[in-house]
Image (cartoon, rainbow, N blue to C red):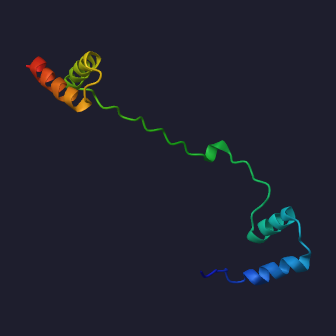
Amino acid sequence: MAVFTPPGFYDFIMDLDRDGVNDIEQFLELRKQQVGISPVKKPRSRSNVIRVPKKIKKTRKVSAYQKRFGINLKKLKKAHPRTNISVLMKKAHRMTRRDRK
């Protein structure tokens, strides 16, 4: 297993030892200064913020067949609770086709 260290990492660590930075908070502040991140965030003005309207999720329309099939399946499930669901679905499908004619 190879361990990769970025170029200049050893020099960075040695610089920390020379500066006498032992505390983690001091290290983080020093690192932020080196990278150029300011510790205090400036508040953004609201005029610059672009608001994107939320997309409304489309709901699919339930067909008349699906509604009738659901009713028939519920009736069969209530009448035959221990029967395999695939058998009940086949029966409900036949009943629905008959009803829809």
Where's residue 12, x and y in %? 78, 79
Image location (x, y in percent) of residue 49: 60, 46
**x%, y% of residue 15?**
84, 80
Residue in the picture at 24% in, 22% down:
73
The foreground one among 79 and 60 is 79
The structure residue drawn at horizontal position 83% and vertical position 82%, both measured from the top left corner, is 14
Quadrant in which the N terminus appears = bottom right
**Residue 23 placement: quadrant:** bottom right
* Left or right position of 12 against 19: left
Q: How many marks?
A: 0
Q: Which residue is at a point 12% across and 20% down the rendered structure image?
A: 100
Which is more toward the observer, 63 or 42?
63
Is residue 59 placed above or below 29 in the rendered structure?
above
| Percent of width and height locating residue 4 | 63, 80
Q: Nearer the viewer, residue 95 or 24?
A: 95
Q: Judge whether 17 appears above or below 47 on screen.
A: below
In which quadrant of the rendered view does residue 62 lie?
Answer: top left
In-image side of 29 versus 101 (left or right) = right
Is 19 placed above or below 43 here? Answer: below
> Would you place residue 9 above or below residue 58 in this image?
below
Residue sitting farthest toward the front: 82
Instruction: Tell me the residue at 47%/38% (across/down).
Output: 54
* Residue sitting at the far left: 101
Q: Left or right: 82 with respect to 15?
A: left
If the image is split into quadrants, where does the C terminus sit?
A: top left
